[in-house]
Amino acid sequence: MDIHAVAKELLLAEQTKQAIPPLTETYPEITSEDAYRIQLAQIKMKTEAGAQVKGLKIGLTSKAMQEMLNVHTPDYGFILDTMIFDEQEEIPVHQFLQPKVEFEIAFVFNKELSGPNVTVKDVIEATEYVVPAVEIIDSRIRDWQIKFEDTVADNGSSIGAILGTKKTALADIQDITAITMKTTVNGEWLDEATSAAVLGNPLEAVVWLANEISNFGVKIEPGMFVLSGALSKAVPFQEGDYFEADFGELGKVSTRFAKAGVMK
């Protein structure tokens, strides 16, 4: 398998908005290591073109999603500056293929985290604050027919992030595993969950990430953020939809998708 060629194939799918067949069908020999190398090759292409890495995302943090893909581990992807949207902007839908939104807690760091021996204590000491966040996920794989290697190679199926503005220090949170989140779409109740849905504790998700990325020489740098994993199921959206997630003591985050004809 030509890692660089497959990375270019995925990038072309993103650029042309033409999804491709599952990599696991086209390249049945693909391994998880191959998939992460394809992911890194794409990120290298994008950063060489001028994009900057601003953060990372953790996926597959729920048992239900892991069982669906027949794996027992989360995955991760990169968040570039070109993928970050502001709460106040209306995001055009036409730039995506088959998008969905997820609601998460984002950790923002003021110290480096470098595996492979990162602990919960290390994560707490390196965290400057947390904010509520929305992740936009998308798949360049046709009809979301993904296996683990497909989503990993496709940058964890990530395409965007919106960070809330309320900054909360970990020391001010009574129990990081008991944050309650309630979500609405267009003012109507959508879903609710607690932060324990993220590997039992979002801090453990970040520990996993910091240690896992060290396998490829990656570390969490000061100033970067991490989307720690979805608290509830991913939700498809369409033009004009407005989502709001209330994380209680952590505050709210919202995002609106532009109606037809509204350009970024």
Image: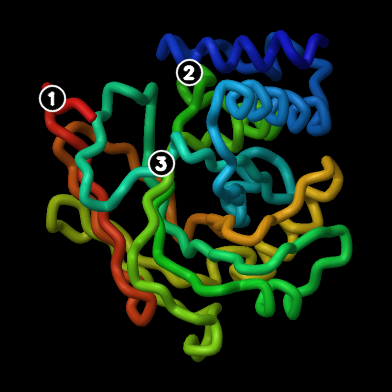
Residue situated in front as seen by the camera: 54 or 13: 54
In this picture, residue 5 sits left or right of residue 232: right
- Name the amino acid, label 1: Ala
Q: Quadrant of residue 232?
A: bottom left
Quadrant assignment for the N terminus? top right
Residue situated in front as seen by the camera: 49 or 21: 49
Q: Residue at x 81, y 25 (%)?
A: 34
Q: Looking at the image, is mark 2 or mark 3 earlier in the sequence?
A: 2
**Label 3 close to label 1 by CB (< 8 Å):** no
Q: Helix or strand or loop: what does disc 1 sit on?
A: loop
Residue 114 makes an appearance in the image: yes
Q: Return the x and y of residue 164 as percentages of the image width and height.
A: 35, 62
Residue situated in front as seen by the camera: 142 or 52: 52
**Residue receiving disc 3:** 136
**Residue receiving disc 1:** 260
Q: Looking at the image, is mark 3 or mark 1 earlier in the sequence?
A: 3
The CA distance from mark 2 to mark 1 is 20 Å
Q: How is the image coloured?
A: rainbow
In this picture, residue 27 sits left or right of residue 67: right
Q: Return the x and y of residue 61 as percentages of the image width and height.
A: 61, 55
- Name the amino acid, label 2: Glu
User: Measured along the vertical axis of the image, is residue 238 above or below residue 189?
Assistant: above
Q: Looking at the image, is mark 2 or mark 1 earlier in the sequence?
A: 2
Q: Quadrant of residue 136?
A: top left
Quadrant assignment for the C terminus? top left
**Residue receiving disc 2:** 14
